[in-house]
């Protein structure tokens, strides 16, 4: 069983798109670089910083773009750019935080970490970086004030939640570090992966409309950080679960920043009594899959660690029950345990709910089910009508009368070794990411007809023409809808209407 646990632990990190955190983080850094190039068209201060930012190597770029304040300001600027909520040029704090970060790029602490009153860290050393603990001073200071404002505006936005930060004690930090070590001992590959997305931890008393919260991960105003209730820290087993649970949410957040996951954000009713969004269900499923490998490791490897960390049952009396607990979860109620919820969500996403998901997210769900299969079988029998409203086969045949050309107003940033192209239409700035197939289709759009595009794609991909058209048609629709290409000729208006 230990070999099986190692296999699944490693397998959950083995996919470039869905598992490999180094690649996920790097792709997000490339998104930030591209966003800054677009934003800099309207901001001289940002324009002046671009050469130094582009010159950063991978380690320094991870440090700078992993800084909480820099990321919060970048996400806010991208939202302003794409939604028009505020003028694009309102990027003063972004330019200032980037300039400050560049000035201290060779210092051991990032900009936000350096604003703490005491320098508390926990977790493993990842290329010179450890997790820093929030300890904001009471006295006003530029970085500290900006961080306070980010927390005030951004803690779990839309979730009717509130958080009261708790100043850390050395004991709290030691307990957090102990839980990080336990997580590494049980699932070392999962631990290293999620720690790559986690830069900061805050201790806080939190509440939402349903009562006290044990943990949380924030929104775009508090990215790359998680919150833990101080009373949870005494139990290293569930604290390790909390760290993994919230940090794996950060991992998926970093993934969906560059690849949309949901095409229709409906609310769905769950059999364990909650009604939540499809996106939240996807995040929950992703976390429950990782919980399964952790729970199995606790059962099979955990007894060898009891002498160091104590047995899980020794913490039960002081532990609140919850679905992800490995200490207090003896409820016999239906769907009260994580593996039951995981199986239910897998079934739904692969059948009735599949039409809510983008092709990217459907592939991720299939991969997660395959990755955890050595421990639990999540295979499903597709039901009649599964796939809902989106289960439609490509109709018609490629036409010779519809031609496609690239939008000449695009700003582009290729990431060649990843087969990724970032793009933005200068007339309606929204950052697009094309995968290898979509990038190929974009490059082929030089005035060719649907028929000629399909034949060229078939020749390159080694597909029959009919099979190629099934892939080409939705890519053309997507490229037209995003403004990447322009359709010309008969039926072009019809295609543009369908793409919209």
Image: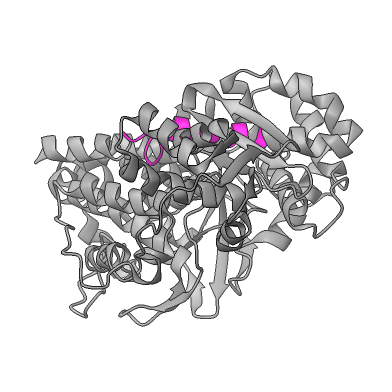
At which x and y percent is residue 51? 77, 19
The mark total stands at 0
Residue 399 screen position, x and y as percent: 49, 48
Position of the C terminus by quadrant: bottom right
Task: Identify the magenta region.
Answer: 14-33
In the rendered view, does 355 fall on the left or right side of 329?
Answer: right
Q: Is 115 on the left or on the right of 474, as rendered?
A: right
Query: Magenta region's main secondary structure?
Result: helix
Percent of width and height locating residue 128:
53, 23
- In reply to whether residue 295 is colored magenta, the answer given is no
- Kindly tell me whether residue 93 is visible in this rendering: yes
**Residue 30 is covered by the magenta coloring:** yes
The residue under the point 88% across, 39% down is 42
**Residue at 62% from the left image edge and 65% from the top image edge:** 163
Is residue 291 or residue 266 the one in the foreground? 266
Q: Is residue 337 left or right of residue 427?
A: left
Question: Looking at the picture, does residue 300 appear above or below residue 109?
Answer: below
Q: Residue at x 32, y 79 (%)?
A: 272
Give whichever of 159, 467 is nearer the camera. Answer: 467
The one of 462 and 156 positioned closer to us in this rendering:
462
Establish if 26 lies above or below 322: above
Does the rendering let one see residue 117?
no
Taking the view exactly as shown, the residue that stands out farthest to the right is 44
| Above or below for 221 versus 305 | below
Q: Position of residue 183 (x, y in %)?
A: 33, 42
């Amino acid at each position: 069983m230990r070999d099986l646990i190692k296999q699944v632990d490693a397998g959950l990190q083995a996919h470039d798109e869905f598992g490999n955190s180094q690649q996920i983080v790097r792709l997000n850094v490339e998104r930030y670089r591209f966003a800054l190039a677009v934003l800099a068209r309207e901001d001289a201060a940002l324009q002046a910083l671009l050469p130094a930012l582009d010159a950063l190597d991978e380690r320094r770029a991870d440090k700078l773009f992993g800084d909480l304040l820099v990321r919060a300001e970048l996400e806010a600027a991208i939202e302003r750019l794409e939604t028009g909520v505020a003028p694009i040029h309102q990027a003063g704090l972004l330019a200032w935080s980037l300039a400050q970060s560049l000035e201290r790029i060779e210092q051991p602490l990032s900009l936000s970490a350096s604003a703490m009153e005491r320098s508390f860290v926990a977790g493993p050393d990842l290329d010179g970086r450890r997790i820093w603990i929030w300890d904001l001073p009471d006295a006003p200071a530029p970085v500290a004030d900006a961080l306070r404002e980010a927390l005030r505006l951004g803690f779990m936005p839309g979730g009717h939640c509130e958080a009261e930060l708790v100043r850390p004690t050395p004991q709290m930090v030691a307990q957090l570090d102990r839980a990080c070590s336990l997580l590494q001992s049980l699932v070392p590959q999962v631990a290293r992966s999620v720690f790559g997305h986690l830069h900061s931890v805050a201790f806080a008393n939190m509440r939402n409309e349903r009562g006290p919260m044990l943990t949380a991960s924030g929104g775009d105003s508090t990215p790359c950080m998680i919150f833990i209730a101080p009373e949870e820290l005494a139990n290293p087993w569930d604290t390790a679960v909390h760290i993994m649970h919230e940090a794996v949410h950060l991992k998926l957040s970093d993934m969906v920043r560059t690849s949309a996951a949901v095409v229709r954000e409906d609310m769905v009713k769950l059999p364990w009594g909650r009604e939540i969004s499809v996106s939240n269900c996807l995040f929950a499923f992703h976390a429950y899959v990782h919980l399964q490998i952790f729970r199995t490791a606790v059962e099979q490897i955990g007894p060898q660690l009891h002498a160091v960390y104590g047995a899980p049952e020794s913490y039960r009396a002081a532990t609140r029950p919850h679905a992800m607990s490995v200490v207090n979860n003896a409820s016999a109620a239906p769907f009260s345990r994580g593996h039951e919820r995981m199986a239910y969500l897998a079934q739904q996403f692969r059948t009735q709910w599949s039409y809510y998901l983008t092709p990217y997210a459907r592939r991720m769900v299939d991969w997660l089910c395959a990755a955890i299969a050595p421990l639990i079988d999540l295979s499903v029998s597709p039901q009649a009508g599964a796939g809902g409203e989106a289960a439609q086969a490509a109709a018609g045949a490629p036409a010779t009368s519809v031609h496609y050309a690239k939008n000449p107003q695009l700003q582009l940033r290729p990431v060649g070794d990843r087969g990724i192209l970032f793009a933005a239409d200068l007339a309606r700035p929204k950052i697009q990411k094309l995968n290898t197939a979509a990038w190929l289709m974009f490059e082929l759009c030089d005035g060719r007809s649907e028929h000629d595009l399909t034949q060229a794609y078939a020749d390159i991909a080694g597909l029959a023409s009919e099979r190629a058209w099934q892939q080409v048609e939705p890519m053309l629709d997507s490229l037209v809808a995003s403004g990447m290409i322009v359709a010309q000729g008969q039926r072009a208006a019809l295609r543009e209407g369908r793409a919209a």
